[in-house]
Amino acid sequence: MNLEPSSKSNPITNTLGDLGFFIRKNITGLGYAARMFVLVLMRSGGLLKRPRLVSDQILFVGNYSFVIITVSGLFVGFVLGLQGYYTLTRYGSEQALGLLVALSLTRELGPVITALLFAGRAGTSLTAEIGLMKAGEQLSAMEMMAVDPLRRVIAPRLWAGIIAMPILATIFTAVGVLGGYLVGVPLIGVDSGAFWSQMQGGVDLFDDIANGFIKSIVFGVAVTFIALYQGYESRPTPEGVSQATTRTVVLSSLAVLALDFLLTAMMFSN
């Protein structure tokens, strides 16, 4: 009788092993990310004494995203104006076009599309910047000089993203409303007074504008931290940095869409 173990591997066992390894790896990664987030928040107090660190980064991430967000907001407003008019005409409610455009932008499209564009433009830049600093051993050099990289590098960029996101979302929404007006009023012929009066009467400061503002802040935290964490934990090689930037776009997009569902369910369920 042959008592030697079979050299053939069991595919079911291998699949379960790979699944267990994948789950354990991701749970470990979530733990590291949560620990890093808490440490960054704890070490952000010194930024009050050096606000220039944050303002410089706000200018940096804002400049990277301003043009694409402004142009995208204008064209999204154009599309909303056209599609909204064609839809409302079926029900004889074309005068409510301004309300439709404003609610769509303030509640959903403004924060969500801004976050997605921010992740693709500024988020990848932050990941690449931190990853290259790690590959060039600049972060290790800071630690050798008793400079905390989390306090000096990560924290200013995190708060810059949190502050810049609501500003960019507001710009996107305002330009989108302008785009909807340009299509609806001069091009199609909707009454200008009805366009603005319906908007002013139907958009609530707290239920619509404030909730959209809160969404943009939450998205800013998620997208910016994912970008910084991926850069900080990337492998110090060109391939590692490129893979980290790819993960930033994918994870940020999924996080924004998932958080949008949860926040919408909580805010507008009543």
Image: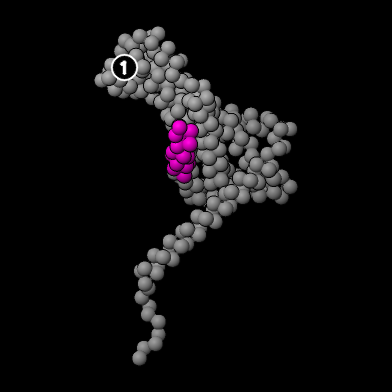
Give the residue at x 38% y 21%.
100
Q: Is residue 21 left or right of residue 59?
A: left
Give the residue at x 43% y 61%.
19
| Disc 1 secondary structure class | loop
Q: Residue 77 appears in which quarter of the rendering?
A: top left
Q: Which residues are magenta?
A: 251-270
Q: Is residue 89 above or below residue 222?
A: above
Task: Categorize mark 1 by other alpha carbons within 10 Å: few (<14), some (14-19), many (20+).
Answer: few
Q: Is residue 165 left or right of residue 264?
A: right
Give the residue at x 45% y 28%.
107
The residue most toward the front is: 270
Q: Residue 6 appears in which quarter of the rendering?
A: bottom left
Give the residue at x 66% y 50%.
140
Could you tell me the amino acid type at mark 1?
Answer: Ser
Q: Is residue 148 left or right of residue 262?
A: right
Residue 144: % across, % down: 71, 50
